Image: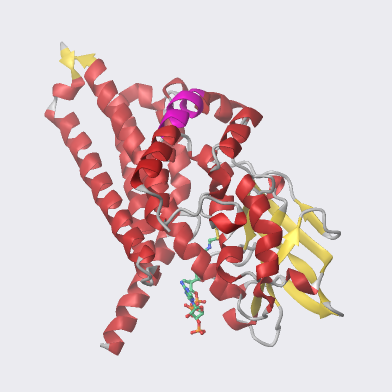
Amino acid sequence: MAMDSDTFAQLLDTIERFVREKLVPAEARIAEEDKVPDEIRQGMRELGLFGLTVPPEYGGVGLTTTEEVQLFFILGQTSPAIRSIIGTNNGIGSQGIVLDGTEEQKNKYLPKLASGQMVGSFALTEPEAGSDAASLKTSARRDGNGYVLNGTKRFITNAPHAGLFTVMARTDPSKPGSDGISAFLVEAGTKGLTIGKIDKKMGQKGAHTADVIFEDCKVPGEALLGGKEGLGFKTAMKVLDRGRLSIASVCVGVAERLIRDSVNYALERKQFGKPIAEFQLIQAMLADSQTECYAARSMVMDAAVKRDAGQNVSMEASCCKYYASEMVGRVADRAVQIYGGAGYIADYGVERFYRDVRLFRLYEGTSQIQQLVIARHMLREAKHA
Ligand code: COS
């Protein structure tokens, strides 16, 4: 249920202040040290930011999708790595349980994820199964009342910090596609589960990914998400529908930040005897960024409203993720151009965003996968018309 508008406005106000006063000043240090300081994690816990999308009956804030995207328009206005700290608990690391978990699984894990006491992680990708997620090879062989997992998951966000993994594994080897896949809730520390070394990434320093390796990792029968085999792929796809909208809203937030910084820089920086903001070629870049960002924001709001009204927004979520992630790439590129030489120098921070936003076009489905999902929906609808 939506919050009353005053309470929600207050929440947005608090987040806006937190971003401005605590997060933006810490950006350079986080990138330098490749670590989000404990006091920021704690501040995020105190503000309830780990449980924004977890229903209130399990200790979360229970934001509607419309509220969530508005919040991320604001929380996105800082280094994406900071958002990533709470990203999995609000998105792919909790939503499988919210959507398809048994009551027991919800009661056991959601309060811990909502409070930030436990970090949730989503283990779908494998060395040889990225875009083609349904070809995953990690196996879950039945063993007595439980299962034994074997396989390697790759580039798993927040894996080094996670207390719980939603793991997609094949329970039925006779079915090579999506039907044979089930989802499991596997706790960190389970014998046979190890985490690889932290990946060295192009950007988003402070947010960590790593391999998650299962070697004869035995889990109890209760670890099967929803208590039913064969539903894991569908759960993953539903989780990604919401995740993609959320990523799109973060892209809008980052773009708004970069546009603001670009405008301020253009007003300050003087060349040929006047601020560069007075030159029409600079104005054209600002106008293009603003127009595209506004388009992405409107798309995200429209899809969120539709989702809250109970409509299937798989296609819209892909449209939003596709457009917004490509848009923020162009906005970041123009920001570097407006800053000129300074845009290439680390002290100004713009080059860091330029690298950070590159990931948005890759994770939770590449731009090409979004195109494919969009086109499939269009063709399916046309066939059924
Ligand atoms: N919601 C619910 N069910 C869905 C769904 C969705 N959004 N998308 C697909 N499904 C269902 C389909 O309806 C189908 O069910 P039936 O067999 O009962 O008809 C089943 O899942 C398989 O779907 P599909 O045939 O479309 O699967 P494909 O193997 O062709 O793959 C893509 C679909 C490519 C879209 C999928 O693999 C994908 O999204 N890949 C990218 C993965 C990704 O984002 N990885 C990022 C890592 S996670 S951070």
| Image: magenta residue range | 16-25
Here the colouring is secondary structure
Please tell me whether residue 153 is drawn above or below residue 210 in the rendered image.
below
**In what quadrant of the picture does the C terminus appear?**
bottom left
**Residue drawn where x is 42% and y is 31% of the image:** 351
| Camera-side residue of 219 and 11 | 11
Q: Which quadrant would residue 280 be assigned to in this image? A: top left
Q: Residue 310: image x %, image y %?
A: 38, 70
Q: Residue 2: image x %, image y %?
A: 40, 55
| Camera-side residue of 56 and 364 | 56
| Camera-side residue of 43 and 343 | 43
**Residue drawn where x is 50% and y is 29% of the image:** 23
> From the viewer's perspective, is 27 left or right of 136?
left
Q: Which quadrant would residue 136 be assigned to in this image? A: bottom right
The answer to whether any part of residue 211 appears in the image is yes
Number of callouts: 0
**Residue drawn where x is 77% and y is 54% of the image:** 188
Please tell me whether residue 286 is drawn above or below residue 308 in the rendered image.
above
> From the viewer's perspective, is 89 left or right of 285?
right
Q: Residue 376: image x %, image y %?
A: 36, 77
Q: Residue 86: image x %, image y %?
A: 56, 45
